[in-house]
Amino acid sequence: MRKRGRFFRFPGKGGVLELGAMEDRIERLESIVSLQERTIEQLDGVVTDQQRQIDELERKLMLLGQRLRDMQTDDDPEGPEPPPPHYGGGR
């Protein structure tokens, strides 16, 4: 880029921008980058919170699974319990 007075020529592109227009364009780009940085920071916070929630839910699911297995083995390790004598069972 060669500076000629208040204009800039972009080699290979054939374009010429006035200094003020270039400054405006740079300011817009800086504003866009700043907004994107804030958005990325916000999204990072959301992802971090969601990962914490996932970790907690996985931990709770493991505990519930263990409790269910414990309940199944505590019932009767030899199999299902026969019906009580007063049940009648169709006899």
Image (cartoon, rainbow, N blue to C red):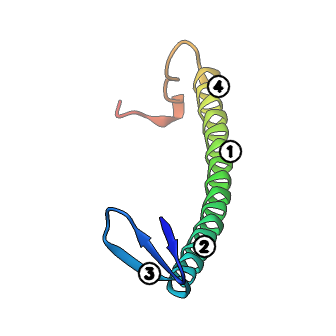
Quarter occupied by residue 78:
top right
Compared with 14, 85 (above or below) is above
Compared with 17, 71 (above or below) is above
In the foreground, 9 or 72: 9
**Hey, what amino acid is under mark 4?**
Asp
Disc 3 designates what residue? 17
Disc 2 designates what residue? 30
- Kindly state the secondary structure of the residue where label 3 is placed: strand
Earlier sequence position, callout 2 versus callout 4: 2
Earlier sequence position, callout 4 versus callout 1: 1
- The crowd level at tag 4 (other Cα within 10 Å; few <14, some 14-19, many 20+) is few
Which mark is nearer the camera, 2 or 4? Answer: 2
Please report contact status of discs 4 and 1: CB closer than 8 Å, yes or no: no
Query: Residue 80 location, x and y as percent?
Result: 49, 22
- The crowd level at tag 1 (other Cα within 10 Å; few <14, some 14-19, many 20+) is few
Query: Residue 65 location, x and y as percent?
Result: 59, 32
Earlier sequence position, callout 4 versus callout 3: 3
Disc 1 designates what residue? 56
Earlier sequence position, callout 3 versus callout 1: 3
CA–CA distance between discs 2 and 1?
39 Å
In the foreground, 40 or 13: 13
Earlier sequence position, callout 3 versus callout 2: 3
CA–CA distance between discs 4 and 3?
76 Å
**Hey, what amino acid is under mark 1?**
Glu
Q: Residue at x 67, y 34 (%)?
A: 63
- Kindly state the secondary structure of the residue where label 1 is placed: helix
**Hey, what amino acid is under mark 3?**
Leu
- The crowd level at tag 2 (other Cα within 10 Å; few <14, some 14-19, many 20+) is few
